[in-house]
Amino acid sequence: MGEAMDCRGVDLSGAEIRGDLEGRNPPIFLPRQPAASPLVALDIGGTLIKLVYTASCEGGGSGAELRFAKFERRRLQECFDFIRAKELLGCNGTRSGKENVPLKATGGGAYKFSDDFREKLGVCLDKLDEMDSVVSGANFLLQNIPGAAFTHMNGQRNPVDVSPNNLFPYLLVNIGSGVSILKVTGNRKFERVTGTHIGGGTMFGLAKLLTGCKSYDEFLQLSQKGDNFVLDLIVKDICGELVCQKQGLSTSTLASSFGKVITSKKRLTDYKPEDLASTLLSAFTYNIAQIAFLVASLLGLRRVFFGGSYIRGHKSTMENISFAIDFWSQSQMQAVFLRHEGYLGALGALMSYGDLSGENLTLEESKEKEPHHESAAPVDGILSDEENDSNIFPYLLVNIGSGVSMIEVIGKGKFERIIGSHLGGGTILGLARLLTGCSSYEEFLELSQRGNNLSVDLTVGDIYGEEGYPKIGLPASTTAASFGKVNSSKLSDYKIEDLAAALLNSFTYNIGQIAYFVANLSGLKRIFFRGAYVCGHEKTMDKISRSLKYCLSMAAMMASEGRGWESLRSKGEVQTTFLCHEGFLGTLGAFWSYENMGIDSLAAHEVIREVLLGAPYTGQFPSLPVTEQQENGENNTLEGEIESLRNSNAALKAEVERLQSENAELRAKLRGATL
């Protein structure tokens, strides 16, 4: 027998939030919704199952309430037991075979676990497209529920009055296991413009390994009690307070997440779980906010909404995101959060009950209607041999040290620092030391060569099945969430080689993606990478190159379809080159000097300190106050670090002088050969 058409719908007239407005996911009262026949919808994601259902109002009375529940995906049976106990599918929690009315579901797990629902509950899943559902859920809240949107800044939560007539366009950043970023232009009108695999799954996966926590809520509780300054490298650690005052830099500006671990002799067990959790939370929330800011800037959007199951109304999470968006945009953008932010997909699926328009595509229909796209083949980032001093400018110089600095060079001696990232080489090596016990960056790279990141990384195929998610151009092999497969809290359950491979894959891709966005935002077509953590390391350079090629291919595919990235279509390809040291460009072996590139003055000690070694400009982050005892202890440690930096600087200066001498000799020989 075929599936019956479900004509039941959701009556949104007079909908409002009931109960504790400050509580987590309070019920939504639907005064005109009949409660006799319950409706239920699910969003089965990479790590969580989110469930929304209608039920009779507490205390009786007319109307119904929307209620919310969630379960870990690996505990699917608990979800089945809940549905039975609440009798959400009729008598005894199961539908009769004669009725055969489908249950609305979205997310990759809806496709993957369809047979389980049929076997355990006797129900057929009506599988809806995930992005369609997420956008429908967000629009439902913003257009129908008073008080659904709010800001969270400086410890204050303030409601945002959103007019349905002035809602679109906006940017929706959905933080699940990974992060999807969508440009929403109307009801059922949107495009997924990009995403990142450094999301909630990454935070939780690393939190399990580093702190031993069993749940994400436990991780958030730990982070509230910790101090990220114990592990994070800040500007004061690099420059000292006097230099910061001279250059107008905030002493507490974050330079490199986990950067202090590099010079510390401590092992993982020597750090407090609370401090590790606080460092993880700040590292990844600031990174997500930075990517959101760059994408919104590229698309010319000023309104950015954040949703997803990994926000959870957590004050520090929202505070970090809000501060970063406000700082980078110079108060021109505002981070806005949503009540019930973790249930957008499930809410959107619920709204599809009674929808007879046929506009709500199922997952299978979206796959059938989506044309197949071959991956665009971007031009390799190679400068021709005819490049000369006059046409090399302008370009983006990306210096990968403990943190990452991005500098626009427009001519000889003319450059300006644009932005930076706190997730740099110091973050990679710091986490590598904690997770693998390696003693050097070279040892870490050797470990990564022998590892398989797919042992710990969650892929699109793990969520959606072997076909992937073709509607948005994501094959099954695409990484959805770095460290998203980590289920055990025992570090010994994982090979250190696999952990090293996952670290390299996640952070090098992140650096390449941010560099791509910054180059396009600044209208630059050339990117030069330099720094101790990239130059001379073939694996690192290859990973960054791949990330840029992927960004280029996705942009080319979307531009060819006329969906998204209109601002990038006229800017052409981005050429990528690795500058290993003066006179050598890693990807083509051509001869260039810092002088020809207009950056010879960057060799000056003060300029390096200010521009290259300086922290990414992310502002003065909120943190726990530093006690006098902590400052004294840090000063003693820093004296040794400063002396080490001085010795390294002297060695580097000698090496530069040697290379300059060789450069002069080679130029003389070339002139002689020409004559």
Image: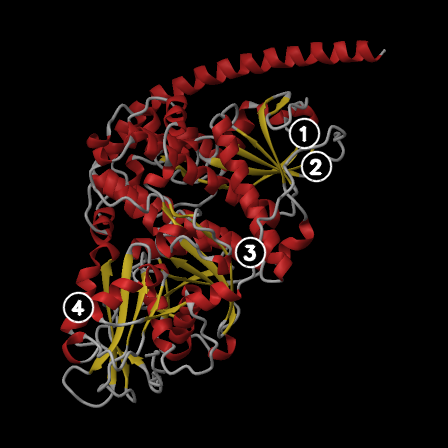
- Which tag, 2 or 4, sits closer to the chain's start? 4
**What distance separates the C-alpha of mark 2 from that of mark 1?**
9 Å
Residue 468 lies, with reference to residue 341, above or below; the image says: above
Residue located beneath label 1 in the image: 598
Please name whichever residue, 586 or 374, is drawn nearer the observer in this view of the structure.
Answer: 374
Residue located beneath label 4 in the image: 82
- Which tag, 3 or 4, sits closer to the chain's start? 4
In the image, is 119 to the left or to the right of 599? left
- Which tag, 4 or 1, sits closer to the chain's start? 4
What's under tag 1, amino acid-wise? Answer: Gly
Cβ–Cβ below 8 Å for labels 2 and 1?
Answer: yes
- Which tag, 2 or 3, sits closer to the chain's start? 3
What is the secondary structure assignment of the residue under circle 3? helix
Q: Position of residue 392 (x, y in %)?
A: 71, 34
Q: Residue at x 29, y 23 (%)?
A: 636
Instruction: Give the label, 3 or 1, closer to the camera.
Output: 3
Q: Position of residue 181 (x, y in %)?
A: 46, 58
**What distance separates the C-alpha of mark 3 from that of mark 4?**
44 Å
